[in-house]
Image (tube, coloured by chain):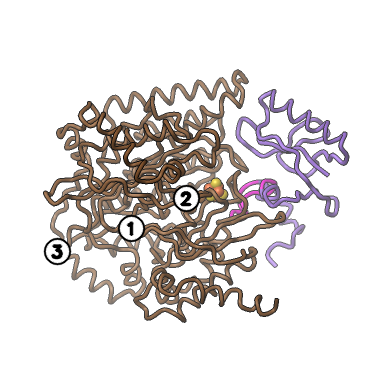
């Protein structure tokens, strides 16, 4: 894992001191809210419906046990005993007092964490494939590049006041688990014909009120040009991105209005002027950062195969969990484990302080001290010996985190919605809970197969509804909650924006509507191997529309 | 009918203005503004509380009376007044738990 050097630590400590002083002055009434708001936002502090909210950065979703324990400590000491893992691989606390923020940030700094650039019109926390460094299908670990981007973008003087926020995601595999095409910049780490590492560069993806799939502007960028090229993109954006209208200020609008070809030409022109400057990464620097991410020493554990086979026979629930939540590792004696934060009927992404502590202990004992947060709001142990899987499963059962639903219909992404968020129009969590309860039966979920259901409580789309196979967007209509359904979205290497299926549904209708959609899929799918998304792509919206609204048309 | 609400500076707690001049942590007992003049008065109080660095996100919200209880019209405001609907153990709603246990809401049936 990356360890802070003295510059990192000094910088974070200095920021804690600076913000402590700002909080003191705010509490003493020496600065106004208008003066303070941008300062608190730069440090991840929002004001929500019930209280302040603190968003803590988890760079590329990677945590050590010590860091996870600190997150638990903060939940217990300054909050109400839980935290919410977000689709940006961060954690949010829902109840901290402003007066406690300096202490919380000091606690975080003591484990090399902070809340800097988790808000504001700057380059936000860089996200990455949650199986990075473990995935059998990746060409190289994308996190060293995410770390290089983090260092470069932290309080970058030129890019701290962009027209709007800016999100970068990196993946090192063909199979895109980091949803890179929904980001302002998406980087796909790959090898060229000569075996050299570099990136396919995507620009201008995004969700929100104007969802767009990113456009590829370069098929192969040598790895040492990462910062030169990103700088070129940011420069073009900083120069020409709109500042007159918040809703048109993201780079996706600029790329769209300029045209992909012309935009790419402008970036290439900027890049020509930068590619041989100090922004060209020295080979030694890349390899030095890479060394921090060296995989743990994975000793041979060939006994795992038999151990798993026997344990499968003994326990059906373990066997189901294996099928659902355990994926292949690059080392055949090992596996990567998804710890579902989507217990049936629970709030997606929430974890209690004691669960966080238990996960930290377990990671220390059996997972090389490494934990990941996925953008799908689950936790991951990226490196686990297959021989230890049963022991891990048993412990997860003890702490209520052994739900075997990864990628199934109850593995729902949901934003905090109207239960917490000041911007929300409708609740998300309760919708997720109702759907989860309706589809609680695991055999039924497994029969339905892979189905990504994503819910946002407003058009800002933090719950990624646009790219859900089934997406649900909460809106407010005549003072009541109404849920609009989109179908056919996906956030992988075939990123697609879902299509609105028809009129929305009230809170009492939405679960039934989802069930109707699922039943329709089951009736029209070619066979069990045809996933919901494949079926939708094959048959289109017609059968779903018919099932949802036919009665109404006839009645009308 | 309207009441004046906001969030307290120190801890972000949702609060409502009362006739005695305080900002209380529950909506019950909030000062009602029934006409334009009363609304203007509350609005001025809100602006002052904001300027005095006491209360943030100051707003006049629409409410109705049910059996003498103040109920906000918008769900957003009802959730602010109670707490997250998925965590009834948290927020204001949790604090009134003794009242509920005493039989006011027929809990458990
Ligand atoms: S999508 Fe809207 S409601 Fe949900 S967290 Fe984002 S801003 Fe809040």
* Mark 2 crowd level (few <14, some 14–19, many ≥20, 10 Å Cα): many
Residue under the point 15% across and 60% down? A301
Q: Quadrant of residue A503?
A: bottom right
**Disc nearer the start of the sequence (3/1):** 3
How far apart are labels 3 and 1 at the CA level? 33 Å
Q: Quadrant of residue A433?
A: bottom right
Tag count in the figure?
3
The chain ID associated with circle 1 is: A
Residue A524 visible: yes
Mark number displayed over residue A302: 3
The answer to whether dots 2 and 1 both sit on one chain is yes
Q: From what the image shows, is residue A180 above or below residue A323?
A: above
The chain ID associated with circle 2 is: A
Q: Does A30 appear in magenta?
A: no
Helix, strand or loop status at disc 1: loop
Mark number displayed over residue A266: none
For the colour brown, the matching chain is A
Q: Position of residue A54 (x, y in %)?
A: 50, 38
What residue sits right under mark 2 in the picture? A207
Helix, strand or loop status at disc 2: loop
**Disc nearer the start of the sequence (3/2):** 2
How far apart are labels 2 and 1 at the CA level? 16 Å
Region of the chain picked out in magenta, as a range: B80-91
Q: Colour of chain B?
A: purple
Residue under the point 13% across and 52% down? A193
The residue at the far top in this view is A30
Report whether the residue tagged 1 is closer than 8 Å to ligand 1: no
What residue sits right under mark 1 in the picture? A493
């Amino acid at each position: 894992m990356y360890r802070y050097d003295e510059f990192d630590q000094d910088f974070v400590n200095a920021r804690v001191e600076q913000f402590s002083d700002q909080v003191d002055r705010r509490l003493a009434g020496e600065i106004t809210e208008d003066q303070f708001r941008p300062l608190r936002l730069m440090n991840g502090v929002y004001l929500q419906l019930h209280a302040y909210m603190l968003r803590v950065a988890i760079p590329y979703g990677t945590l050590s046990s010590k860091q996870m324990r600190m997150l638990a400590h903060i939940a217990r000491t300054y909050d109400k005993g839980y935290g919410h893992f977000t689709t940006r691989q961060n954690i949010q606390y829902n109840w901290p007092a402003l007066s406690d923020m300096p202490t919380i940030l000091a606690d975080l700094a003591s484990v090399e964490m902070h809340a800097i650039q988790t808000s504001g019109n700057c380059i936000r926390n860089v996200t990455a494939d949650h199986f990075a460094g473990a995935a059998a299908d990746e060409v190289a670990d994308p996190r060293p590049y995410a770390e290089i981007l983090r260092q470069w973008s932290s309080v970058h003087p030129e890019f701290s006041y962009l027209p709007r926020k800016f999100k970068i995601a990196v993946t090192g595999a063909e199979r895109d688990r980091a949803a890179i095409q929904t980001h302002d910049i998406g980087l796909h780490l790959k090898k060229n014909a000569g075996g050299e590492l570099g990136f396919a560069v995507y620009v201008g993806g995004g969700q929100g009120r104007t969802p767009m799939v990113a456009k590829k502007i370069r098929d192969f960028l040598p790895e040492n040009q990462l910062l030169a090229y990103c700088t070129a993109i940011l420069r073009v954006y900083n120069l020409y991105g709109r500042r007159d209208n918040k809703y048109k200020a993201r780079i996706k609008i600029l790329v769209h209005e300029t045209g992909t070809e012309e935009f790419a030409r402008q970036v290439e022109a900027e890049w020509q002027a930068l590619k041989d400057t100090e922004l060209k990464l020295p080979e030694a620097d890349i390899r030095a950062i890479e060394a921090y991410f060296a995989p743990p020493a994975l000793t041979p554990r060939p006994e795992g195969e038999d151990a798993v086979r026997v344990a499968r026979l003994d326990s059906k629930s373990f066997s189901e969990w294996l099928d659902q939540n355990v994926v292949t590792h690059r080392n055949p004696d090992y596996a990567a484990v998804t710890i579902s934060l989507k217990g049936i009927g629970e709030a997606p992404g929430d974890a209690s302080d004691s669960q966080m502590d238990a996960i930290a202990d377990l990671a220390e004992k059996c997972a090389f001290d490494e934990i990941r947060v996925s953008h799908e709001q689950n936790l991951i142990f990226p490196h686990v010996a297959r021989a230890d899987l049963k022991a891990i499963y048993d412990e997860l059962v003890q702490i209520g985190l052994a739900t075997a639903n990864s990628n199934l219909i109850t593995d729902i992404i949901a934003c905090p919605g109207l239960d917490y968020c000041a911007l929300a129009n409708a609740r998300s969590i309760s919708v997720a809970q109702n759907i989860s309860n309706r589809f609680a039966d695991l055999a039924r979920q497994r029969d339905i197969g892979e189905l990504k259901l994503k819910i946002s409580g407003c058009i800002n789309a933090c719950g990624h509804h646009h790219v859900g196979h089934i997406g649900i967007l909460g809106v407010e209509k005549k003072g009541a909650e109404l849920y609009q359904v989109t179908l056919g979205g996906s956030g992988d290497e075939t990123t697609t924006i879902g299509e609105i299926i028809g009129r929305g549904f009230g809170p009492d209708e939405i679960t039934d509507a989802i069930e109707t959609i699922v039943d329709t899929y089951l009736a029209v799918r070619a066979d069990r191997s045809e996933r919901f998304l494949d079926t939708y792509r094959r048959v289109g919206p017609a059968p779903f529309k018919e099932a949802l609204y036919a009665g109404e048309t006839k009645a009308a | 009918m309207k009441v004046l609400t906001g969030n307290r500076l120190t801890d972000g707690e949702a609060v409502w203005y009362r006739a005695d001049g305080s900002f209380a942590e529950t909506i019950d007992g909030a000062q009602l503004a029934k006409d334009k003049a009363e609304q203007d008065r509350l609005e001025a109080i809100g602006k002052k509380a904001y300027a005095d660095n006491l209360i943030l996100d100051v707003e006049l919200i629409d409410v109705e009376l049910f059996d003498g209880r103040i109920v906000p019209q918008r769900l957003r405001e009802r959730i602010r007044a109670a707490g997250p609907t998925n965590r009834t153990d948290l927020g204001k709603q949790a604090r009134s738990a003794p009242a509920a246990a005493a039989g006011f809401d027929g809990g458990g049936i």
